[in-house]
Image: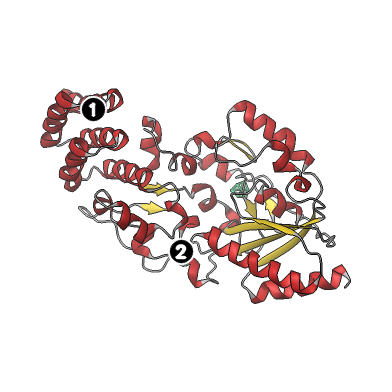
Amino acid sequence: MAYEQLKEEIVAYSKEIGIDKIGFAAANEFSEMKSRLELQQEAGYQSGFEKGTNEERTQPELLLSNAQSIVAIAVAYPSRMKNPPKSKKGERRGNFCRASWGTDYHDVLNEKLDKLSTFIATKITGFQFRSMVDTGELSDKAVAERAGIGFSGKNTLIITPEFGSYVYLGEMITNIPFPPDEPVDDGCGDCTKCLDACPTGALVAPGRLNAQNCIAFVTQTKGFLPDNYREMMGNQLYGFDTCQLVCPRNKQVDTHLHPELEPDPELVKPQLIPLLSVSNREFKEKFGSMAGSWRGKKPIQRNAIIALAHYKDEAAVDELIRLMKEDPRPVIRGTAAWAIGKIGTSDGFDAIHAAREKETDEEVIIEMDKGLAFEKVKQNI
Ligand code: SF4
């Protein structure tokens, strides 16, 4: 079968299975990326979540021998929800980023790639492939750019003409020499809105991210957070959307094509106080199918504590005192102590003083002292 004809059949089938955009690229080395990766590593700008060596990340033939082409897919996700629940006094709510709305996109896209590979296998003998979504060695964005899915924005995201940057990306390396598509001939022009809006300056240059400073990354770490990030996170429990929200290419973009990607408002904007006492089993049952749960409940609970401090929610103080006194995890005890101090009730300060007498973990004691520093500030006023 002629590859052009097979490609047309694949494109038609991809629409049937809910792939919103598909593109084809040659599986040549991503040579332009190698030096960029090295620079990012030298600068300490990587997240640490990356997979594989620089060679594996830039040479598809190391991942599939006889790699000839890469099929890139994009699935669009919504940017707005209907009837978001209100965050009220005493019932404050946190926020999961849009890429964590609905069913974990890794599962959604992997299922579509599985169907696609099964379809291609029925059409051609000797078909070999390797699929990946986000957690593979290849850069989804570099593949999508080469395959004409969209252009690479200054916010480092792929921006499609149809769905803005609200797309999930995945790809399949194949041993079939599909004719490649043309890259999207567009760009950001003079716009710098995402760089200007990034609260931490994580976009150090157009198209260059220091992941260590990116709040989306910071929300996924497991240790104590530096104080300045706590201030900037607001009520964010997982991820961060500012560089997408300010982008003019996303204006009016809100795509609702996949019921499984629709948000459950109670899950993506959950009440904060109940989150503090959720058991492992409850957490898994409730949040386990969301992309934002992949690091477990500890970072989410730590971020919930920071969000309650951000709101200065006095209704949370009793629960925070319980965590400070009883929780086995130092990060939770210490962050709770800091939050109690930031909220600033006299009962809270008394509780920190009492707990500090018994605390043995040095990092937690540092946080308790930070919490008590708010008392001094208050007294000076
Ligand atoms: Fe590009 Fe402006 Fe969007 Fe940033 S905000 S990605 S500069 S168009």
SS at mark 2? loop
Q: Is residue 194 shown left or right of residue 351?
A: right
- The C terminus lies in quadrant: top left
- In this image, 84 relative to 126: left or right? left
Q: Position of residue 162 (x, y in %)?
A: 64, 64
Quarter the N terminus occupies = bottom right
Q: Around disc 1, counting alpha carbons within 10 Å, would you say few (fewer than 14), some (14 to 19), or many (20 or more)? A: many
| Viewer-closest of 260 and 347 | 260
Picture quadrant of residue 332: top left
Query: Residue shown at 49%/72% (left/top)?
Result: 259
**Residue behind label 2 places its C-beta within 8 angstroms of ligand 1:** no
Q: Is residue 76 visible?
A: no
- How many numbered circles does the render carry? 2
- The reply to whether discs 1 and 2 touch (Cβ–Cβ < 8 Å) is no
Locate residue 149, reporting x and y percent.
Answer: 70, 59
Three-letter amino acid code at disc 2?
Gly
Query: Pointer 1: what residue?
Result: 368
Residue 335 horizontal side relative to residue 255, left or right: left
Q: What amino acid is found at the position of numbered circle 1 in the picture? A: Met
Residue occupying the far right of the picture:
2
Going by the image, does 99 lie left or right of 161? left
Give the SS element for disc 1: helix
Task: From the viewer's side, name the closer residue of 67 and 225.
Answer: 67
Pick the residue in front: 27 or 67.
67
Question: Which residue position holds label 2?
Answer: 102
Residue 110 in the image: state x and y as whole percent.
60, 62
Q: CA distance from mark 1 to mark 2?
A: 37 Å
- Can see residue 2? yes
10 Å neighbourhood of mark 2: few (<14), some, or many (≥20)?
Answer: many
